[in-house]
């Protein structure tokens, strides 16, 4: 149980294009989903928190117009990297927290490796 | 500013040996999580520690939490190669939804 999927797992795109990454909770409903970014050999940095039906809350320094987050349902959140540039190349990981969870245990997706040429 | 620091950042150890990874954090929290990450993969949950004095064990790994000292430990007993991975602790930031991740400890176990 508690499986989170991400699609695509890997994407290569040209500079200036937009890329959409999907995050789905497969066997549970998630009140909240989180988007993280991880550079090679570094820790996870929280980018934003999204709640179904409301606007995402972005961490300081994360451009909301560049990283568009849509949490359309209790099982789906999307991250769109708009006008991607090489410096946006990174490993993007989503996580989800179950409805009714008593504490903040998060279940992580497999990650999406974005390479911008 | 909240800091979550792990020590050591890199650990190379021989099979069969014991070692402890430390996770120090700078704010009030009584919940801490340990995760494992294999290269190119996402995070696998290892332990959830929910109160002061909590101790959990699974196989060769044992985690503990001391909220007064703001310290968690991950102890490795008789290491085997399969334990090679990066280990992260994450602190539940009080009164928020957020997890703040530690710097990570890259563990390599050699024969």
Image (tube, coloured by chain):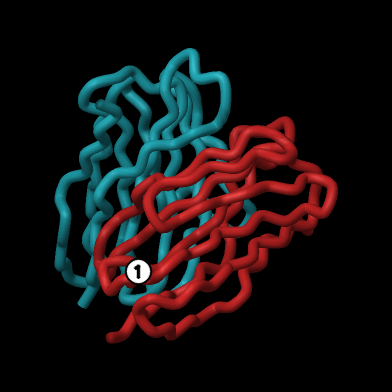
Mark 1 neighbour density, 10 Å: few (under 14) some (14–19) many (20 or more): some
Q: Position of residue A55 (x, y in %)?
A: 50, 29
Q: Residue at x 25, y 33 (%)?
A: A3
Q: Is residue A113 left or right of residue B75?
A: left
Q: Colour of chain A?
A: cyan
Question: Label 1, on which residue?
Answer: B85
Q: Is residue B15 left or right of residue A101?
A: left
For image coordinates 31% across by 71% down, the residue present is B80
Q: How many marks?
A: 1
Residue depicted at x 63% and y 33%: B50
For disc 1, the chain is: B
Observer-nearest of B38 and B79 = B79
Chain B's colour is red
Q: Is residue A43 visible?
A: yes
Nearest the viewer among B71 and B39 is: B71
Res B99 → quadrant:
top right
x%, y% of residue B104? Answer: 51, 68
| Residue B27 drawn at (x, y percent) | 80, 50
Q: In which quadrant will I find the C terminus of chain A?
A: bottom left
Residue at 33 percent across and 66 percent down: it is B83
Q: Is residue A34 above or below residue A85?
A: above
| Residue situated in front as seen by the camera: A33 or A110 | A110
- Tell me: residue A67, above or below residue A43: above
């Amino acid at each position: 149980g508690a499986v989170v999927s991400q699609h695509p797992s890997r994407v290569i795109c040209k500079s200036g294009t937009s890329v959409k990454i999907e995050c789905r909770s497969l066997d549970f409903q998630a009140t909240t989903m989180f988007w993280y970014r991880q550079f090679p050999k570094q820790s996870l940095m929280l980018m934003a928190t999204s709640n179904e039906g409301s606007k995402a809350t972005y961490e300081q320094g994360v451009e909301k117009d560049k990283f568009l987050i849509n949490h359309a349902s209790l099982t789906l959140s999307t991250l769109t990297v708009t006008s991607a540039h090489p410096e946006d190349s990174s490993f993007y990981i989503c996580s989800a927290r179950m409805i009714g969870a008593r504490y903040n245990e998060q279940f992580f997706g497999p990650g999406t490796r974005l390479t911008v040429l | 500013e909240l800091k979550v620091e792990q020590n050591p950042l890199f650990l190379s150890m021989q099979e069969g040996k014991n070692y402890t990874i430390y996770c120090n954090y700078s704010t009030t929290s009584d919940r801490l999580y340990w995760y494992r990450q294999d290269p190119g993969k996402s995070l696998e949950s290892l332990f959830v520690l929910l109160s002061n004095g909590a101790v959990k064990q699974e196989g060769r790994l044992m985690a503990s939490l001391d909220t007064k000292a703001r310290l968690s430990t991950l102890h490795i007993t008789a290491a085997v190669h399969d334990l090679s991975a990066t280990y992260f602790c994450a602190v539940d930031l009080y009164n928020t939804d957020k997890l703040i991740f530690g710097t990570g400890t890259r563990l390599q176990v050699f024969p």
